[in-house]
Image: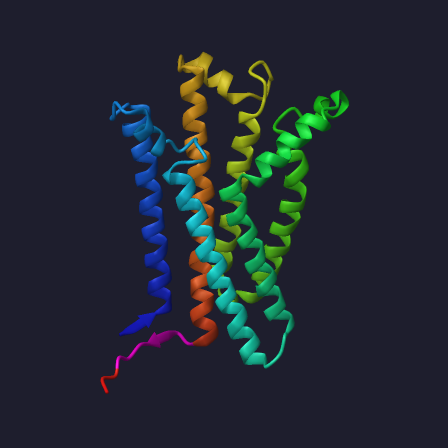
Amino acid sequence: MRLDGQRLALRVFIICFVAEVLLCLLDVFVNYGQGSETGAVRRLFNMAREDGLGSWFMVLQTTVAALVLALITTVEKHRAQAWSGAAIGWLLLALFFLYLSADDAAKIHERMGTLFDKYGDDSAVRAWFPSYGWQLVMLPPLAIAGSVMVLFLWRQFGDASSRLLLLLAPVVMALAVGMDFIEGLELDHPLNLHTWISQTYEFGPKSVRHFSKVIEEGLEMLSISLLLMLFIRQLFSSMSPSWTIEVIKR
């Protein structure tokens, strides 16, 4: 069996993208549209919840990305016969994605935000940062780590298409974070687009908030899917454009 790295990476992305679209549609028709009379079933497909299928898929996808990065680290270390700068960079990236998977599973950044809201609720801070506390506490280090990741991967990826996708992934994630920022604003805040949409198009505030959350989660998944595709391509290119798996009978 011959595995082509470029085709496999594209197929994995397509599978992830189709799964993300299906998860959003299941939320629309089963959860929001009450396609099931059972509340537990609706919660299972609720993309806005942290204990549904959407959250599980995000954790799974990020964990797979961490494993692929670990494989790249092993390959780079084997090629250099030592811990080269590139191998250390890939290792740190694998650990970063492992943390991201743990964050999605255990809601680490939300819990840090709750801790900040409980012990660090300062009116002066709230005056210039009116959204969720987790963004104030966790977003700066995550943004720095993301920027370092982009710079490192930019040097590792030589072709234009990979670099273009590399720039696209953090932009998609930034859009999701921006939507989360808007979600955390008070209803009467001038930057709260949810209130404007509700008043302009006569949508219920809960509906606007819910579908905003669904889009936000979908964008986060899409960003990880793009990076996962790039990591799989890098894994194959670091070893061979294709792998051949042979089964020998003895």
* Residue 242 highlighted magenta (yes or no): yes
Chain part drawn in magenta:
240-247
Instruction: Specify whether residue 74 is in view.
Output: yes
Q: Is residue 203 above or below residue 17?
A: above
Q: Residue at x 64, y 40 (%)?
A: 138
**Quadrant containing the N terminus in the rendered view:** bottom left
Q: Position of residue 173 (x, y in %)?
A: 52, 43
Q: Residue at x 63, y 45 (%)?
A: 143
Q: Nearer the viewer, residue 210 or 56?
A: 56
* Residue 38 highlighted magenta (yes or no): no
Q: Is residue 208 left or right of residue 79?
A: left
Q: Is residue 225 above or below residue 122?
A: below
Residue 34: quarter of image: top left
Q: Main secondary structure of the magenta part?
A: loop
Q: Is residue 147 left or right of residue 241?
A: right
Q: Residue at x 65, y 24 (%)?
A: 130
**Quadrant containing the C terminus in the rendered view:** bottom left
Q: Position of residue 20 (x, y in %)?
A: 36, 43
Residue 10: quarter of image: bottom left
Instruction: Specify whether residue 45 is in view.
Output: no
Q: Position of residue 134 (x, y in %)?
A: 62, 34
Q: Nearer the viewer, residue 190 or 104?
A: 104
Q: Nearer the viewer, residue 148 or 161?
A: 148
